[in-house]
Amino acid sequence: MLVLLALGSVGIFFVVRHYEADLPSTEEIKGGRYRPPQVTRVLARDGTLLAELFTERRTVVPIESLPPHVKLAILAAEDAHFYEHEGLNYLGMLRAMLINLRSGRTRQGASTITQQVVKNILLDPERTYRRKIREVILARRIEQELTKDQILELYLNHIYFGHGRYGIEEAARYYFGRSARTISLSQAAMLAGLVAGPEIFSPRKHPSKADQRRQFVLGQMQAKGFIAPEQKETALQEPIALATAQSASAELAPEVVEIVKRTLQEVAGPGAVLGGYTVTTTIDPKMQEQARRSVRSNLESYDERQGMRGPLAPPKKPPKKGSRGAPFEGTPRFEDHKVLVGEVTDWDDELGLIYVRVGTVRGMVRLDDHPRYNPKKLAASKFAPKGTLLRVSLLAKEHESKGEEASPPVPLRLELGPQSALVALDVRTREVLALVGNYEAVPGGLDRATQARRQPASTFKPIVYSYALHTRRFTPATLVDIRPGSVRGIQATDESDAASTESVRLREALAKSVNVAAVHVTREVGPANVVSWARTLGITTPMEPDLSLPLGAYEAKPIEMANVYASFASGGMLELPKLITRIQDPSGNDVALPASPPSRRVMEESEAFLITSMLTSVVDRGTGQMARSLNRPVAGKTGTSNESKDAWFVGYSTDIAVAVWTGYDDARPLGRREAGATAALPAWVSFMKGAHAGKPPTDFPRPADVAVVSIDPTTGLLPLEDQDDTMQEFFLRGTEPTERVVADAGVDGSLSPDGDVPEVPSMEHDATTLPALPPPETTVPLF
């Protein structure tokens, strides 16, 4: 017996040494190094949950923050003698071994909480004798290196509770809508009962089984002396009240979530993937919801005007080969991300599928995924009969197959209507209050508010005119040449009737969006100086110093345009937009945010007031008159690029600056009668109504160094002594008119006497005669 005992001991020694050779280290769970995947929460400015990012839905909580009945419920259900044994239940292990030997396979385990920690965190879940031996060795090692509370904390934060929830905190939030720190005894017992079978005992799937399991756990707690009989009875009387199964609104602000992801990667590096961060943004949930609703409503109105909603019909006459509307020929590539024209070849009403041939590829559109174009819920065959031409894009690569017809159809997305973007900034803080980059609101979608570069068209004109005011060469009353054809290649206006006079005041030129006037002003102050001024105001996209500049021929981002106008509204202060105000790491410590330059003055307050005053005329009697329905002081400018490829409205109140853009990603014309006033302004007005609801109107304050002078409306000069048709105009001190209009003298003839078109001077301009510009901030990205 002694010999056998000795041999057995030696054998056990060598078995242990054999399995110890490649055991994983326990260092990763010691000394606060435990970093399992957790949930990162993205919050709005008021704490509203915008999104949860995770690979495993888990939130780690310290064990000392949990009430005693939570820990005791888990112990009663899983390992009542946890604080008494040294990590192993020898009798249970012997019983399980005998059962497994009889059955010839692994049927039963006898794992303590310590062993489960080892199995779930350090080992794989395979059910073999090899893994069991390794588990036993590691369990003894962990018991020697960690306290019981540390082991139990690891267990409570790591185990699975069903429905994709890991750890006691996420389980409590999901099932009861509250933190594990505040759940009742009855709720703790139900959660503890889930561990043995998260799907079987789920109160959402099987409420009766879940209740039976809860009763069992409460009975075990009483039997082990963890609770008194009256506590058990009180807990049993508590009804099972589950929280409504809710998640953060996936459609509220996915564009914001994508920016948060990129910022986390920047500040946290690889650790961002593990999660556990809390990110507070500047988004106002109500404004964000209003912005999404406004953009969608505006696009749906466009769809209805332009016949983009079902039922659609095949073209009466086949489009000319190679034209914009002709079906695509060749083999499309998913990598190109292009919008293509395909022809409907078949449909399946039962599955709601439309089959479309795009060149050599056979694709399919899921009609249920596009309620925007099918509000009447038409069957696929009624929505788009055979032969209908549809604009689509590929959602995946073509399947490789020898036979084209044998390959499954490629999923397609309908691209019938245009897209839109809206961004709203707090004028004083430059915090982003709302951000919408597309209609669909899907994670990973193109955020046109911060990423798209489009021609700003006439919304660029205030940049030109604000610089003209800055030079003191122009005032709102300065007469500008607007004769049709006075600049070769430039039409008189983009959004209003051709001018009936030869010159108008600068204010009216902006209100009526007169292109020729903007070109003349740019030529006078120097295109190169306008480019520098635009850079100073925050435009970072490439621009060239030529006479197409004032017509918005060079691209800009919607968020940059909104920020330029916010500088006007704030009295000439420039500050970069802010979207994130705070990032906390898994331990609750603040993470340093990317550095941003301080706010600085880029124009005098009086200059900002003057351009604001001129922009109010756009609303009062110009191209933005729809905004008068707001019944409050607002300023803004419409914009429509050539062939109506881009439609804009950028404007502001005393509190909020908002830019709205509408257009096709492939720069297709928006169609007849579409312009900034019809395709963008309605969304702006809708948003501003919601954003200012219940707030009293406030006027733009006039600085003390802005003079008010009566002028003759025709010439911009001082009126006659007894003139009746005078008007009030604002001037920077020192720029007021000094000449008085001469009776019956007519309009000042600043034009060529013979009416010839003046030559366009060289783009070079002597900047030394103009006021110095502040240095532009061109290297700091937004956010």
Image (cartoon, helix red, strand yellow):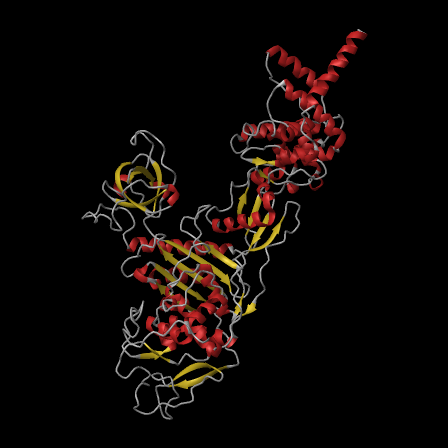
Relative side of 265 to 489, left or right? right
Relative side of 190 to 404, left or right? right
Relative side of 437 to 218, left or right? left
Q: Is residue 568 above or below residue 648?
A: below
Quarter-of-image position of residue 422: bottom left
Relative side of 601 to 658, left or right? right
Q: Residue at x 49, y 55 (%)?
A: 286
Q: Is residue 664 above or below residue 492?
A: above
* Whether residue 597 is visible: yes
Seen from the viewer's position, the closer of residues 527 and 92 is 527
Seen from the viewer's position, the closer of residues 112 and 356 is 356
Which percent across, then down, holds residue 153? 69, 36
Pick the quarter of the image with the N terminus: top right
Seen from the viewer's position, the closer of residues 288 and 54 is 54
Q: Residue at x 53, y 47 (%)?
A: 261
Q: Is residue 100 above or below residue 442?
A: above
Which percent across, then down, holds residue 741? 36, 90
Quarter-of-image position of residue 599: bottom right
Quarter-of-image position of residue 634: bottom left
* Whether residue 633 is visible: no
Which percent across, then down, holds residue 514? 33, 72
Which percent across, then down, holds residue 698? 49, 71
Which residue occupies the extreme right position in the image? 2
